Amino acid sequence: MQICPKIRIKFAIYPTTIITEPSNNTDNSSNNSDSNDSNSTPTANQKKIKDLQDQIASLSDQENTINDVISKTRLEIDKKNPNDDSNDIPSEEKLDKYNTENINSLDDGISYLNKQVENDTQKLKNSPLGSNDYYIANSKLKDDTSNLADLQTVIDKYNDMTKAINSYQNEYGYLKAAQQALDQYNSLNGQLSDLTKQKDSLDDQINSLYAQINTLKNQ
């Protein structure tokens, strides 16, 4: 008669233990899942920052493209610069300077300086080494030799201009080509100015977007 109560006590405790443990495990798993989902979901500010960063990347690509065009335009401007010292690019100013020169006078100057150099050389030979006359003759020889080289450069440029003018048939043809070159040069400068303004505008937009990002991060 004392055994039955003990059996009933064992059966009463056993089911209670089985039911309680699975119930607790299920609740914990559910809570962990909710916590993970919450951590992986971007906040509203994070979404805004990502959108702003995408806009910055797009604007930066546009800016890089414009920078490439600016570099190429500057190279073209240098090639078509009418103020360049070469005769490859026709210019009204170069033609004016050409017409102020007189090839006969230039040739006379070459002849005169050649004689001066010959005289300076002879005086230098006749002057005792280290004497005052020697130093004077040596200094004058250097000056006349330098002037002769400069004048020869002027004559070379004059002859080059003569060939350039003849390549356009005459001075009228040369002037027409010079005006075309100047128009192209001014057009390229205008393009460069527009491109620079576009680049500056993109810079301002990018800086504004970065400022917005910093504001959102500090909230």
Image (tube, helix red, strand yellow):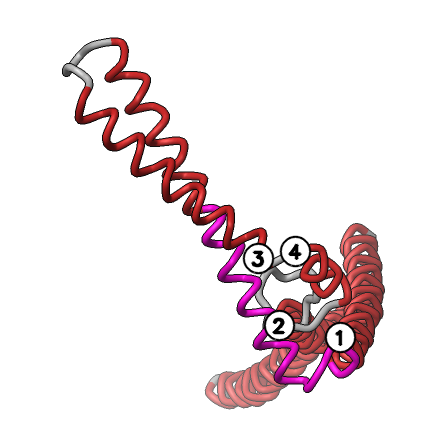
**Can residue 46 be seen here?**
no
Between the C-alphas of marks 4 and 1, the distance is 19 Å
Between the C-alphas of marks 2 and 4, the distance is 26 Å
Amino acid type of the residue that numbered disc 1 sits on in the rendered structure: Ala
Q: Are marks 4 and 3 in contact (CB under 8 Å)?
A: no
Q: Which residue is mark 4?
A: 101
Q: Residues within 10 Å of mark 3 (few under 14, many from 20)?
A: few
Amino acid type of the residue that numbered disc 3 sits on in the rendered structure: Asn
Q: Secondary structure at mark 4?
A: loop
Q: Nearer the viewer, residue 91 or 65?
A: 91
Give the residue drawn at x 79%, y 50%: 218
Between the C-alphas of marks 4 and 3, the distance is 9 Å
The answer to which quarter of the image holds residue 205 is: bottom right
Q: Are marks 1 and 3 in contact (CB under 8 Å)?
A: no
Q: Residues within 10 Å of mark 2 (few under 14, many from 20)?
A: few
Q: Which residue is mark 3?
A: 104
Q: Which residue is mark 2?
A: 79
Q: Nearer the viewer, residue 51 or 105?
A: 105
The answer to which quarter of the image holds residue 55 is: bottom right
Asked if 147 appears above or below 192 in the picture, the reply is: above
Q: Nearer the viewer, residue 113 or 191?
A: 113
**Residue 33 appears at what percent x and percent y?**
64, 81
Q: Judge whether residue 62 is colored magenta.
A: no
Q: Which residue is mark 1?
A: 178
Q: Which residues are magenta?
A: 150-173
**Residue 211 appears at what percent x and percent y?**
81, 55
